[in-house]
Image (spheres, rainbow, N blue to C red):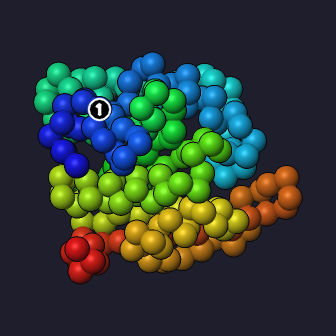
Amino acid sequence: MSYSKLKHGESVPFNETLSIQLIQQKDLVDIFKMFDDEEVNQYLFFAPADEALYQGFFAPIVEDTEKALEEQRWPDNPTFVIRDHQGQYMGMTAITQVMLLEGNREVGYQLPRLAWGQGIATRACQLMTELAFNELGSHKVCADCYGSNVGSYKTLEKCGYVREGEHADYYKTTQGFDSKLFYGMTKQQYLKRA
């Protein structure tokens, strides 16, 4: 993986059939469509929601990405879109800063249904973890997910993240309540796996 090309906004191979690139304004249509899918948003505490909420969240990310490209630096919260070779949207991933805690980041990934079960989330998590520790100077990377989101926490575990805690009955869902699971990895843990 060429971090340099990725940092400069180029589309680079993600695997044999997909590419990955820093987020652009034009990607938001596909992202918002994914958030409106009930199969996807059952695991997202912020969705479904009015598009204005999504715009309010993503507009600063896109603006900072554009500015970072001009300044030839990594965006504050590197966010990427994954597409197949025909340009079909296959998901997004990010490695975001934890507010007020320099060196702490959170990994995230969301995929449309058509991309589930293909190893895309695992590759995205691996890539974001590598980016955090090798390029962004992180000392800790965390993630959280719904307790019922087996795919998400299995992905984290495959990538070396350790379960660090749980908030029981944290999320109110249409089926009742669900827990919030916390995962993390330190730089030392990452280096031991390398």
Whole-percent x and y of residue 157? Answer: 47, 73
Amino acid at dot 1 = Ser
- Which residue is situated farthest in the front direction here? 16
Locate residue 48 relative to residue 155 in the image: left or right.
right
On-image quarter of the C terminus: bottom left
Q: Residue placed at 39% from the left, 74% from the top? A: 160
Where residue 140 sits, quadrant-wise, is bottom left
Q: Secondary structure at mark 1?
A: loop
Front residue of 23 and 14: 14
Give the answer, above or below, for where 48 lies relative to 161. Answer: above
- Answer yes or no: is residue 82 visible: yes
Question: Residue furthest toward the right?
Answer: 175
Residue at 49 percent across and 57 percent down: it is: 119
Q: Nearer the viewer, residue 143 or 122?
A: 122
Give me the residue at 50% from left, 65% from top. Answer: 155
Tell me if 20 is positioned left or right of 71 in this view: right
**Can residue 57 be seen from the camera position used here?**
no
Q: Quadrant of residue 165?
A: bottom right
Q: What residue did someone put label 1 on?
A: 11
From the top left corner, tell me how far across and down residue 86 is, in percent.
46, 27
In this view, the residue farthest toward the bottom is 192
